[in-house]
Amino acid sequence: MKKKTHKRLFRSLFAILLMSFLGSGAVLAYELVIAPAQNQNTLNQYKDLLYGSSSSAASSGWSGNGDGQPTPDPPASSDTSSKPPTMEPLEVLDKFRPMLNRNEDTAGWLKIPGTSLDHPVFFTPDNPDYYLKKDPDGRFDKYGSLYIAGNCALSPQSQILVMYGHNMEYDDLMFGQLMLFKKFDFLKKHPTFTFDTIYREGQWKIIAVCRASKYETTLFPYTNTAFVHEEQFNAYIYQARIRSAYYIPDDPRIDDSYLVMSTCDYFFWGDRTVIIARRLRDDESMDAVDTSAYQKNPVRLWPDRYYALDFITASRPSDEAIRDGYEAFYGK
């Protein structure tokens, strides 16, 4: 009887372990194979809509409220004042009409050379984080989609557009690709990219690659969507540059358009990698961007939370050292 009891216990234990193994294998297969494949399949369908026949774009018959979105609130700023958006209302570009016919939340398309980022971008101002865990068709997807912050506006366009996307850490999908810009050589090879809104095509130059904290936006207001006055603009650019991993020659102006791409990083709670780009002007081109003078920032400023970590031995650089490094490269 004891032998039979032991056999039954062994078989039960074996069955439990086998079921656990198979269940874990199924979950692992879904996480590593099926979910990424489903995500890529949906993205490919949207690529077909964008890169397909131009005749289909012109004849798609998409109709809406004129801009594909509800009328958004004015752009927000940490300053209590407000500034009108910088662009007049525009007509929808024909190439986006097939996508808008499929999904009226379409805001544009981001393509960054050297990465797998060749993705649609969405905008839902009444439900800002709707695409945080939704694929382009609105189905649950742990990878989510790229989307514009709800306090932005597309038409007229906010002076600064803020874009979010997931960084899953264990893979390089979505904004996990932005981690490539932590490598100096990668930035020098790929200093520019394209981001077209549904109203206007745009070429962009990266001007800062920063670490930020979602809890320290008073010190570095990277989520702002407008500059109220010249002093605020100058302070923003200064903070971006001293927090950037690299010194990047550029002449940003208050009347330029800017794009901020923000994603989670995982060195401390609330850690963010933030890439700031300036829209190239009509007399500039991506091919003419010269990276030969780019330099690593020797006195880069991290968020205060970084220096508060127990295992960090580095101390915060002095304000004087930060200022001296800045002025040595950019001038006063």
Image: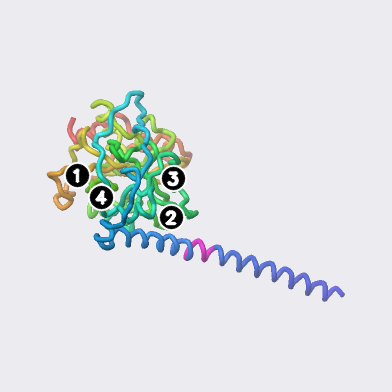
Point out residue 143 in the picture as x, y percentages from the top left corner: 45, 54
Characterize the local packing of mark 2: few (<14), some (14-19) or many (20 or more) Cα atoms within 10 angstroms.
some
Q: Earlier in the sequence, mark 4 or mark 1?
A: 4
Q: Amino acid at mark 3?
A: Phe
- Relative to 11, does residue 88 appear above or below in the rendering? above
Q: CA distance from mark 4 to mark 1?
A: 19 Å
User: Is disc 3 placed on a helix, strand or loop?
Assistant: loop
User: Is disc 2 placed on a helix, strand or loop?
Assistant: loop
Farthest residue to the right: give it: 1
Q: What is the magenta segment's predominant secondary structure?
A: helix
Characterize the local packing of mark 1: few (<14), some (14-19) or many (20 or more) Cα atoms within 10 angstroms.
many
Contact check, label 3 and label 1, Cβ < 8 Å: no
Give the number of the mark in front: 3 or 1.
1
Q: CA distance from mark 2 to mark 3?
A: 32 Å
The image quarter in which residue 18 lies: bottom right
Q: Earlier in the sequence, mark 3 or mark 4?
A: 4
Q: CA distance from mark 2 to mark 1?
A: 31 Å
Q: Residue at x 23, y 27 (%)?
A: 230
Please give the residue where the numbered disc 1 appears in the rendered image: 280
Marker disc for residue 224? none
Give the number of the mark in front: 4 or 1.
4
Contact check, label 2 and label 3, Cβ < 8 Å: no
Please give the residue where the numbered disc 3 appears in the rendered image: 267
Q: Residue at x 80, y 72 (%)?
A: 6
Instruction: Say if residue 300 shows up in the picture.
Output: no
- Relative to 1, does residue 120 appear above or below in the rendering? above
Please give the residue where the numbered disc 2 appears in the rendered image: 137
Q: Nearer the viewer, residue 119 or 252?
A: 119
Q: CA distance from mark 3 to mark 1?
A: 32 Å
Q: Assess whether residue 47 is covered by the magenta stretch.
A: no
The image quarter in which residue 300 lies: top left
Marker disc for residue 93? 4
